[in-house]
């Protein structure tokens, strides 16, 4: 359903979120993202890097067919630009160039520095204290880490943004970009959480007006995110609808952070098998999959604004611009 993004909805959450315990232990994460392919990854990068509850160990770029080849390199450069030029981060987690192509088959990894980092960083974790790896692009590097070091399944948990819906699975972009990678992931014993396309559409869709009202007045970073959304909308949504601005676009990948922040509901199901046509088979199995069923979008967007505002008040992202954009 469409959400009404107005100040009277968002601001009641702001004070409580600012006061919410950052005393909790931080959540260690590795983010694998095809930033530059669309616009949603840019929002997630800004959200996760400004959030005190996340200990971001690394960001790894990921391929997508819409990125100029080599796709992993193209995505890497977009991430670097956002982190260093848009967010003006002088100190930030390492950024690695990940795979530029999908797996050739379900047995052969695509080695790269990002895969090596996932494996090495996982070694200080265990079955009872897992590293969260967020695959919000293709699953190539996650699957490659599993193929290179099968013991990693005892040290990580994988969150994937993909598939269309439960129970069918279905054709969604991230999974389509490396079907074999997701076959490897689902066939392994690694714990898996999925935020699917239908849930993201229902909860994380923004019209042009909603996106502008949400972030455009929240500092240079928020203004940049709005301009990215606007440019995407005019290139990909508006040409198909002459005088209709009501069609939304989806900030798909925010479902990953919503889950880690406890802003979703989910169900646990027997783990399916992924066919080559992206449909699920459902054999009898003791293995499970956690499936996000709903997102509390009000809390997600309120949290996002708090993190953007707090970061920009405490970091030099362009003082004059910041003073003119940030709410007083």
Image (tube, grey):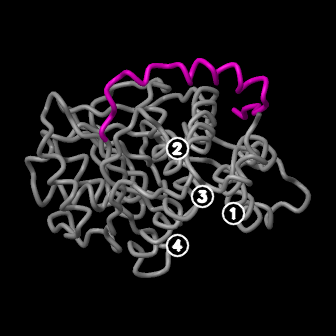
Mark 1 touches mark 3? (CB < 8 Å) = yes
Q: Quadrant of residue 27?
A: top left
Relative to 244, say whether 217 is above or below. Answer: above
Q: Are marks 2 and 3 in contact (CB under 8 Å)?
A: no
Point out the frontmost of discs 2 and 3. 2
The picture quadrant where one finds residue 178 is bottom left
- Structural crowding at the residue carrying mark 4, measured as other residues with C-alpha within 10 Å and reported as few (<14), some (14–19) or many (≥20): few
Residue on which the image places disc 3: 39
Label 4 – label 3 distance at C-alpha: 12 Å
Task: Write the start and end of the magenta stretch as one range.
Answer: 1-28
| Image side of residue 301 versus residue 113, left or right | right
Label 3, secondary structure: give it.
Answer: loop
Reply above or below: 142 against 4: below
Q: Quadrant of the C terminus?
A: top right
Residue of label 4: 66
At horizontal 75% and vertical 33% (from top left) the residue drawn is: 5
Q: Give me the C-alpha separation between circle 2 and circle 3.
A: 13 Å
Secondary structure of the residue carrying tag 4 is: loop
Rounded to the nearest angstrom, the CA distance separating label 1 from label 2 is 19 Å
> Which tag, 2 or 4, sits closer to the chain's start?
2
Q: Which residue is mark 2?
A: 47
């Amino acid at each position: 359903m469409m959400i009404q993004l107005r100040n009277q909805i968002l601001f009641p959450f702001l004070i409580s979120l600012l006061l919410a315990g950052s005393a909790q232990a931080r959540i260690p994460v590795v983010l694998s993202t095809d930033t530059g392919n669309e616009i949603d990854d840019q929002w997630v990068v800004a959200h996760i890097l400004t959030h005190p509850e996340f200990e971001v160990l690394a960001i790894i770029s990921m391929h997508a067919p819409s990125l100029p080849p080599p796709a992993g390199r193209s995505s890497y450069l977009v991430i670097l630009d956002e982190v260093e030029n848009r967010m003006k981060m002088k100190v930030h987690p390492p950024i690695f160039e990940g795979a530029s192509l999908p797996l050739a088959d379900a047995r052969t990894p695509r080695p790269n520095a990002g895969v090596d980092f996932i494996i090495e960083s996982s070694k200080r974790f265990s079955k009872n204290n897992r590293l969260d790896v967020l695959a919000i692009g293709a699953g190539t590097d996650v699957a490659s880490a599993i193929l290179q070091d099968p013991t990693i399944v005892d040290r990580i948990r994988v969150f994937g943004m993909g598939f269309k819906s439960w129970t069918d699975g279905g054709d969604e972009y991230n999974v389509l970009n490396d079907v074999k990678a997701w076959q490897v992931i689902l066939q392994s014993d690694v714990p898996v959480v999925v935020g699917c396309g239908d849930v993201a559409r229902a909860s994380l869709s923004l019209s042009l007006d909603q996106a502008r009202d949400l972030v455009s007045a929240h500092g240079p970073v928020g203004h940049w995110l709005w301009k990215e959304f606007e440019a995407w909308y005019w290139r990909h949504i508006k040409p198909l609808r002459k005088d209709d601005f009501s069609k939304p676009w989806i900030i798909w990948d925010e479902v990953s952070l919503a889950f880690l922040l406890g802003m979703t509901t989910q169900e646990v199901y027997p783990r399916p098998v992924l066919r080559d046509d992206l449909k699920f088979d459902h054999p009898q199995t003791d293995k499970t999959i956690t499936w996000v069923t709903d997102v509390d979008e009000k809390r997600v967007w309120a949290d996002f604004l708090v993190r953007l505002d707090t970061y920009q008040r405490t970091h030099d992202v362009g003082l004059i611009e910041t003073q003119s954009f940030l709410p007083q």
